[in-house]
Amino acid sequence: MSSQAENSAHTRQVPSSTDEFIKGLWKENPVFVQVLGMCPVLAVSNTAENALAMGMATAFVLLMSNVLVSLLRHFIPKEVRIASYILIIATFVTITDYVIQAISVDLHKSLGAFISLIVVNCLILSRAEAFASKNTVGKSIMDALGMGLGFILALFSLGAVREILGNGSIFGYGLFPTGFQEWVVMILPAGGFFTLAAWLLIFNIIKQKKSTG
Amino acid sequence: MNEEPLMQIFISASLVNNFVLAYFLGICPFIGVSGKIDTAGKMGGAVTFVMLISSMCAYGIHALLVAIDAPFLQLISYIVVIASTVQLVEMFVKKMSPTLFRALGIFLPLITTNCAILGLALFQTNKGYDFLQSIVYALGAGAGFTLALVLIAGFREQLEFAEVPNVIKGTVLTLMVAGILSLAFMGFSGLGSN
């Protein structure tokens, strides 16, 4: 059973696995629909680069912890499952923390404590509890990839908007000719709240149009 | 060692660098539990208490980890301590005041995954606060968290009666109010920093 599911995950032909992947991107997007893992979304989305790095780090931890939780799902006693999940997640976050520090000290500095705070990202714990602990490894991988990609997309769309409006640049490259008045508030904490509110609003309008039309 | 005066630490943690509105820590309960002023205040109290205890524990753990030279265990041991503190608090509250226990309900165990608490432990370690400074820092952060939560709950209670389009209701409206509140809190910047 589990080997079948794994095969289908690799070839991506059986619809169920593909569905697990797709749902994270749009229908159950972790940020815009489920509103999970808000803290890093708001805090490190002030530039597109930070947002992308944070998204990838979170997606990596999500993938690894989903795989391990799914592998161990028959061995972890029910009473201590949450504690075990948190320990698994904390281990991978520590690894990610050191890897990012090794790749780029500047990036590590600008992300600051938020790399460590991936541990308490509700998104990862909720996927471990709601999905990986009940499904096969193959399905869990697809779920983690979909959710991770959805998270990266959401973070990036926030970070890009904030950087373009607040800094007049994208990935550090200037966009506008001189004379463009930067919208400084977008870089500040308040801008994070406003941008996220705007994106959620857009999603709500689309959903409403779909349900009525 | 950090030489900041205690009063400055308190003001900075509660107002200038408010954990919710400036650092975006603890957004989940901020959106989830901020429906009523009463619940928001109790939640703030519980979080402050856990912050205080885990801040003291984190100080001891950090000293121990430095002594045995194992910094990579920091994150894992912090989260374990926070989880067990929350468990202890839960048992204590259940025994001492069943009424309060029922009032807090599911939000008590959920404090474990409140990033404000782990964030506090990590920040105080990064800043190199000593024992007394850590306690004041935890109190300030808790006060700031409670203040933000109660403020937003007050706004939301009033907004219940406002006529807004359906698409804005709920999270979107809360986020917009939070943004405006965050703008207002920017007025505190510079306070206490001479």
Image (cartoon, rainbow, N blue to C red):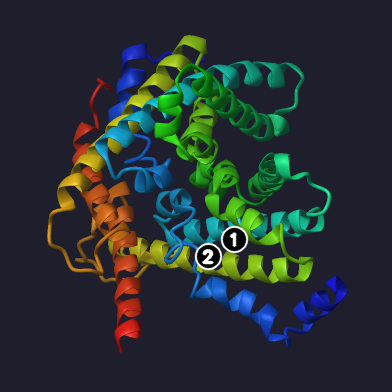
Residue B17 visible, this angle: no
Which circle marks residue B30 in the picture?
Answer: none
Sort mark 1 into few (<14), some (14-19) or many (20+) by Cα contacts within 10 Å: some
Relative to A99, B189 lies left or right? left
What's the residue type where badge 2 is placed? Ile
In front of the other: B118 or A53: B118
Chain ID at mark 1: A
Tell me the quarter of the picture where residue B153 sits.
top left
In front of the other: B129 or A163: B129
Residue B83 in the image, given as x and y percentages of width and height:
61, 32
Asked if B92 appears above or below A125 in the picture, the reply is above
What's the residue type where badge 1 is placed? Met
Chain ID at mark 2: A
Q: Are marks 1 and 2 in contact (CB under 8 Å)?
A: yes
Relative to A167, A96 lies left or right? right
List the residue tagged with mark 1.
A56
Relative to A79, B84 lies left or right? left
Sort mark 2 into few (<14), some (14-19) or many (20+) by Cα contacts within 10 Å: many
List the residue tagged with mark 2.
A152
Distance Cα–Cα, label 1 vs label 2: 6 Å
The residue lying at 43 percent from left, 66 percent from top is: A33
Residue A29 in the image, given as x and y percentages of width and height:
49, 68
In front of the other: A100 or B122: B122
Q: Secondary structure at mark 1?
A: helix
Tell me the quarter of the picture where residue A47 sits.
bottom left
In front of the other: B176 or A170: B176
Asked if B67 appears above or below B22 in the picture, the reply is above
The residue lying at 68 percent from left, 44 percent from top is: A98
